[in-house]
Amino acid sequence: MAPTVHRTWAPKGQTPVLRQRTRSHKKVSGIGALSISPKRHRLGLYLHWHPDKNITQDEVMAFLGELLKHLRGHVILIWDRLNAHRSARLKQWRSYRRRLRVEWLPPYAPELNAMEYVWGYLKYHRLSNHGHCELEAIHGQAKRETQHVAAQQSLLRSFVHATGLSIQLRK
């Protein structure tokens, strides 16, 4: 519930005041994927927010199931080595999804993960300095900001380019 405080603009002599509730352990967790179309023309952003909940392997499996419904053909998932991604139960679940192939990023290499740039942009730019005190308000803002980011192809491309990986995107 504590907002990420980031530098901002204000009229001269009027310091912004950011009010918050203290001692709240409520949060909004998210799981997401950045997709690249087979012909590398279009990028997609898929995010699902979980108010007041941690992401577990159950949420990961549900998210991947929904993702496979939206994406046609074979899906190559480039994944970091988060424990929730490597569980035996999730590995078994993936074994029944023939369209889904996983390629692992090297350990301790978040700079190669385009989704890390998405999370950073959302957290430190789009969702910083909020004044919301209610979980529903933060959840609603997170969903709105996700739609805003997902609609900007140039911004999504910048996240992929920031990784430095040799992924050729076409316009």
Image (cartoon, rainbow, N blue to C red):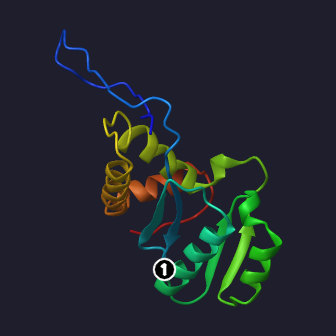
Relative placement, left or right, of 50 versus 94 is left
Q: Is residue 115 above or below residue 11?
A: below
Q: Residue at (56%, 90%) from the top-left corner?
A: 73
Badge 1: few (under 14), some or many (20 or more) residues near its Cα, within 10 Å? few
Q: Position of residue 1 (x, y in %)?
A: 44, 39
Q: Residue at (60%, 56%) from the top-left corner?
A: 54
Asked which quadrant contains residue 130, the reply is: top left
For disc 1, the marked residue is 39
Foreground of the two, 77 or 51: 51
Quadrant location of the C terminus in the rendered image: bottom left
Asked which quadrant contains residue 154, the reply is: bottom left
Foreground of the two, 36 or 98: 98
Q: Position of residue 30 (x, y in %)?
A: 51, 57
Q: Position of residue 18 (x, y in %)?
A: 32, 26
Q: Position of residue 153 (x, y in %)?
A: 36, 62
Q: Is residue 145 above or below residue 36?
A: above
Q: Secondary structure at mark 1?
A: loop
